[in-house]
Amino acid sequence: MNYQEAYKKLEQYGQLHVLKYYDTLATEEKQALLKQIDATDFSVLQTGESEASGESARGKITPLSAMELDEIEAHREEYKQIGLEAIRAGKVGAVLLAGGMGTRLGSDAPKGMYNIGLTRPMYIFERLIHNTMDVVKESGAYVPFFVMTSDKNHDVTVKFFDEHDYFGYPKNYITFFKQEMAPASDYDGKVFMEEKGKISTSPNGNGGWFVSMERCGVNDIVRSRGIEWLNVFSVDNVLQRIADPVFVGAVIAKDCAVGSKVVRKANPDEKVGVMCLEDGRPSIIEYYELTDELKSAQDEKGQPAYNFGVILNYLFREKDLEKIMDKNLPLHVVEKKIPCLDAEGNKVSPESPNGYKYEQLVLDMIHELDSCLPFEVVREKEFAPIKNKTGVDSVDTARELLRKNGVTL
Ligand code: UTP
C-alpha cells in the first residue's frame, strides 16, 4: 500500500491522525506503518460505536438445564471410562488461552509467568501443566497441549516454557500459536497510536482461537493426530481441571457439540455469565443482562432457572467447529487502560480506563452450536481465578483455595 492509498483508507474511516507524524519517520518506519494501515480492519471501530450506544439485542431467553453433581456422581465411573478411552486414543487436545494482556493483574509479563508460590516458585503455567499431568498419570497418555499467545507476548512465553524445560511435559506435545490483533481506540473510535509510526493494537479477544489455529496451520496437527475434542480453558484459573475424563466422557455420552463446565452461582447477583437457551439454541447471558424476572425464574425443581455460571472451560467437538469457522462472531467493546501517545506525542500509561478494545469472545461460539452440556463442578475444587492482585478473584483468594485443596505454596 502506498501513501495515497493509505490516506484514502484512513480518510474513509475518519482516522487521518494516524499519519500525523508520517513525515518525521525513517523510511523503514514509514513502510511499516503503511503495511500496518493496509492490514488493519478499521471497520471494527464502527461496530464499537454502535455497540457502545447499546444496540446489541438478545433473543428469547429460556432455561437450559445442567448436568448436576448428583447425576454426575451416579454415572461417574461410566463417564470416566468413556473419557479415558478417548484420551488414550489421542482424541482429546487441550487449548490454553494465554493471549490476554492481564491488565487487571498489572504485571508486565504474561499472566502465566506470574509466580504464585510463597516458599518456592510456582508459576501459573507450571500449575496448569501440573494439573494436566493428573490426567496423563491416570490415562497413561500425554494430552496434546496447544498454547494461544499474541504478538504482544508470544516470544517471551515460548522462551519461558523453554527455559523451564516445559515443566516436565514433552516438548513435542506442546504447540504455540498466535492469535489475531485488533486496533484499540479512544471513546470516539479514533485509534490510539502506540508509537509515532505504529497503531496501537491489542489481542482481539479469546473468541478467535479456532480460526487462529486454522490460520497458523495448527489444525493440520489436530487433524493429522486424529484429535476430535478440544478442551479450551483460561490461563488464570489455577484449579483448572484439564481434559477431565469424567467431563469428556459425559459430553461424548450425551453426544453434545460442546460441554461447558459450570458452577452454581454463589448468590443471584453474582457477576458471572450463566448458561441458557437463546431462541432455542445454547447461549450464555451476561450478569448485567439478567432482568429481575430472569433472576427470580424457577425450574421444575423449584431451583433458580439461571443458576449455573461459566468458568471458561469448554470441550468442543472439532468437527462442529469446522462448520462454524466462517461465521462472524459479534464484537464486544471492552473498556480498558490502553498505553498510547498523548496529543503532544508523548507515551502515556493511563491509571484508569481511557478507551476501547474490540474483542470476540469464546462464549459467543456456544450460540453457534446445536447442543451444549452444562456440567456442574464444585467451585472450591475447580475454580480459583486470578484476575486481580488483591481482593476478589485475586492472587490472595487463589492461594487460599489452593491451600484448601492441599497444595503447599
Ligand atoms: P480475560 O477476560 O480475563 O482478559 O481473559 P485478560 O486480557 O487476560 O485480562 P484483563 O481483562 O486485561 O485483566 C480470559 C482468558 O482469555 C484469554 C486470557 O489470556 C485468559 O486466559 N484471552 C483474553 C486471550 O487468550 N486472548 C485475548 O485476546 C483475551
Image (cartoon, helix red, strand yellow):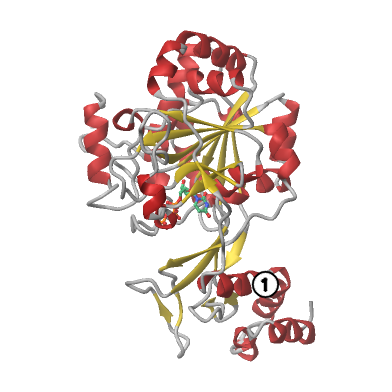
Quadrant of image for the C terminus: top left
Q: Is residue 61 visible?
A: yes
Left or right: 75 in relation to 388: right
Residue 168 position (above or below residue 112): above
Where residue 159 appears, x then y in whole percent? 50, 44
Q: Is residue 199 visible?
A: no
Q: Is mark 1 within 8 Å of ligand 1?
A: no
Other-residue count near label 1 (Cα within 10 Å), few / some / many at <14 / 14–19 / ≥20:
few
Image mark count: 1
Give the residue at mark 1. 43
Q: In which quarter of the image is residue 86?
A: top right
Where residue 264 appears, x then y in whole percent? 35, 35
Please tell me whether mark 1 sits on a helix, a strand or a loop: helix
Quadrant of image for the N terminus: bottom right
The residue under the point 66% across, 48% down is 212
Left or right: 232 in relation to 76: right
Residue 299 position (above or below residue 228): below
Residue 268 position (above or below residue 173): below
Q: In which quarter of the image is residue 210?
A: top right
The residue under the point 54% across, 72% down is 200
Q: In front: 174, or 283? A: 283
The residue under the point 72% across, 51% down is 327
Left or right: 26 in relation to 154: right
What amino acid type should be assigned to the residue bearing mark 1?
Answer: Ser
Q: In which quarter of the image is residue 87?
A: top right
Left or right: 333 in relation to 26: left
Where residue 324 appears, x then y in whole percent? 72, 44
Where residue 242 appears, x then y in whole percent? 47, 28
Q: In front: 214, or 271? A: 271
Q: In front: 88, or 305? A: 305
